[in-house]
Image (cartoon, rainbow, N blue to C red):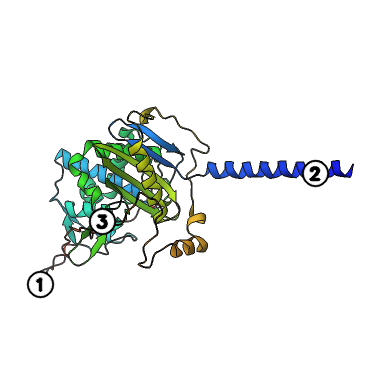
Amino acid sequence: MYDQTLRLTASRLLAATIAAGLALASSTAAFANPKMVVDVRSGRVLVHQEAFRKWYPASLTKLMTIYVTFKALKSGKASLDTPVVMSRRAVDEPASKMYLKPGASMTLDAALKILMVKSANDVAVGVAETIGGSMENFVAMMNAEAAKLGMTSSRFINPHGLPGKGQYTTARDLAVLAVQLRREFPEYAGYFALEGVTTGSKDYPNYNMLIGRFDGADGMKTGFICASGFNQVSSATRNGRTVVSVVLGSDSLAGRADESADLLQKGLTLPQGSGEPLGSLQPYGPDQDQVVDVSAEICNPQAAKVRSENRDDAGRMVVHSPYIKEMTAPPQFSMAAILPPPTPAKGEIANVPVPIPRPASF
């Protein structure tokens, strides 16, 4: 009797342990970070995971800022030589930024390079005000273009991606945007593949760890805030085939690079015609209306300690993907000249843009 009771108790404990393990696995899977890979030419989804989970875009927002700006360039409403003059509102944006003074200026070409490489929030606002007339009008343009593209689960409240109520996207929507950028604006593809930019006095290497290190890597953009974790949209081309990948909520710079490289490699090596059309992918997954916030997991002392320890002797994040190699040559820095504010003539008042109040929702 005692042995039978012991066996029954052990059996129940084992069942409870298995159930707990399955529940934990289910919970982990439910909050797995979103990923996607799409073939640009065919528009077919090669890999996807949690593609419809709402996420903070962070600086991936700047891909939509770039898209609206490219549209203005293509329509003739602006040119690469159009001056971007920094307003007080622009220079007051939080970092990452160029720390410019009101009245400093650059060409739109230089601004686009800085957006893609340095991901400067002050320059993002400067571009928005130049193209849209005001930041509010530009944000309205961003949302209008998102709607036209079918980005049904995206909304933007600013041109840079700093967190705020009502700003969100999904891996699926970012894939739609990335594919459209590659298809619609091949003439501007070089902006996504820059290894770095220089202002003449300072060099800025690209945060994208795949450029120059992954075979065929040619874009696109990285982003980070505590609420989103480490995000990356990447692209690569081999033998005439281009694929884009989206990784949201990774745990580190190296983590998002590893995940992106592995996804791109898989996408580039899958047979042509694999997957289903991006437009046919149906929403799935729980809590599609809730925007995931991973601040507690990403921005805590233990996570920061792990990231700081995962560096080599040169201070670089250690990557583990076998598809990421060392650069064979020093990075090439593209010029992005910035002009200081004009010096007013004696007795004149400097022509500095009037500060504009921040929106209440920021």
Which residue in the rendered view is the most extreme toward the bottom? 346
Q: Nearer the viewer, residue 186 or 159?
A: 186
Instruction: Describe the element under mark 1 as helix, strand or loop.
Output: loop
Classify 238 as above or below 128: above
The type of residue carrying mark 2 is: Thr
Distance between the alpha carbons at the discs numbered 2 and 1? 92 Å
Q: Residues within 10 Å of mark 1 (few under 14, many from 20)?
A: few
Q: Who's the residue at 17% across and 51% down the image?
A: 109
Q: Who's the residue at 63% across and 44% down the image?
A: 21
Q: Kindly report which numbered mark, 2 or 1, lies closer to the viewer in this rendering.
A: 2
Disc 1 marks which residue? 346
Disc 2 marks which residue? 9
Which residue in the rendered view is the most extreme toward the left? 345
Instruction: Describe the element under mark 2 as helix, strand or loop.
Output: helix
Q: Residues within 10 Å of mark 3 (few under 14, many from 20)?
A: many
Which residue in the rendered view is the most extreme toward the right? 1
What is the quadrant of residue 91 in the picture?
bottom left
Disc 3 marks which residue? 123
The type of residue carrying mark 1 is: Lys
- Tag 1 or tag 3, which sits nearer the N-term? 3
Q: Who's the residue at 45% across and 39% down the image?
A: 49
- Tag 2 or tag 3, which sits nearer the N-term? 2
Q: Kindly report which numbered mark, 3 or 1, lies closer to the viewer in this rendering.
A: 3
